[in-house]
Amino acid sequence: MSKRIAILGSTGSIGKNALRVIDALGSDYEVVALTAHNSVELLAEQVKRYKPSFAAITNPGAAASFADLVSGTSVKVLSGAESMVALACLDEVDIVLTAVVGAAGLPAVLAAAEKGKTLAIANKEPLVIAGELLMKTAKENNAAVLPIDSEHSAIFQSMQAGRSDEVRKIILTTSGGPFRGMRADQIADVSLEQALSHPVWNMGPKITVDSATMMNKALEIIEARWLFDVSVDDVEVLVHPESIVHSLVEFVDGSVLAQLGTPDMCLPIQYALTYPERVAGIAEHLQLAEMGKLTFEKPDFETFRSLQLAYQVAKTGGSASVVFNAANEAAVGYFLAGRIKFVNIVELIEDCLNKHEIVAALDLPALLEVDKWARKEVDRCLNRKVC
């Protein structure tokens, strides 16, 4: 039986790799819908190659030029932010693969869960911002939630060896980013170029900066708490610079199971698409003898304060994680634009958390309101020039 797929964010690195994986998997995997925000030319190329029935450009200002580029095709074109929701809910779609950076894809993810779709989630934000709501909605509608993030895919794969009540601890690995081993005073004035020079992974600018601050791992702590229904106290972070052991699960009997592989996102993407089966694919096979050794070390919580904040946020619950994510997105945007220093990113996040009054139970409109507040609060902080 064929699997029909919508890719939200098809022009980013995850989306492009997903299409490569689908190419290799063959005719049993059909691309039904593709979306992008601004990349009209690349999206048009993808439409002409993969011939989806639907395509959406979420930036309304780019819709006309995109429509012109695909005018000779049979694709139905949608535009605007709400177009992702429409495509995620299509009867023609079985799997919604979401790779939209930030909170923009959240309404579509929740809508797909309400429709009982299989969700292949590559970005952290849906589970960080709305983990409780998303997992509750998915359970009520028999929607499967499958992680593509390499660490959470590794945990998901390792957990197949036992029952959830047999898990003692989840261990998230991290490469440590470009500033591993450096002290807080040494990273105070690092440049944007340095922050974007990841030693292992080739990713987009936002997530690469998140890796440099270790905010990506901070978000993954919260993500793991909801995805695997564990206490945040049972989630540990371990620095593993080779990025071969993607994460581990310790069971109550003392067994520790890990998923190993080359630093290649094609493998977790493929596993989410083919689950529960495994098939031959395009990911490079691991040659352990060539690695020589694998090393592990504890993270520096004093230098990378985002990790400390993540545990606090997860324990606080409610709207704290919404503020945590939104303030980070806004602050990283300002860093990429050259308006703040690297160290100001976490300072801005902490400032927002300190000013926010926690809301316990949130529906989607309330989540989006808190998200909006946090972004404005970052703006206010910068305008007051207190950061």
Image (tube, rainbow, N blue to C red):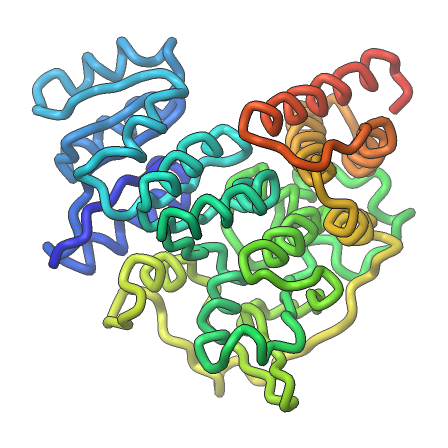
Is residue 44 rendered to the left or right of residue 117?
left
Q: Position of residue 211 (x, y in %)?
A: 65, 49
| Quarter occupied by the C terminus | top right
Q: Position of residue 53 (x, y in %)?
A: 14, 31
Q: Position of residue 168 (x, y in %)?
A: 66, 77
Query: Which residue is farthest front?
Result: 140
- Relative to the observer, which residue lies in front, 78 or 339? 78
* Residue at x-position 65% and y-position 70%: 171
* Residue at x-position 38% and y-position 20%: 82
Q: Is residue 45 above or below residue 136?
A: above
Is residue 361 rendered to the left or right of residue 8?
right
Is residue 129 rendered to the left or right of residue 54?
right
Q: Position of residue 36 (x, y in %)?
A: 35, 28
* Residue at x-position 13% and y-position 55%: 2
Residue 355 in view (yes/no) = yes
Residue 192 in view (yes/no) = no
* Residue at x-position 86% and y-position 41%: 188
User: Quadrant of the rendered structure where residue 87 is?
Assistant: top left
| Quarter occupied by the N terminus | bottom left
User: Quadrant of the rendered structure where residue 349 is?
Assistant: top right
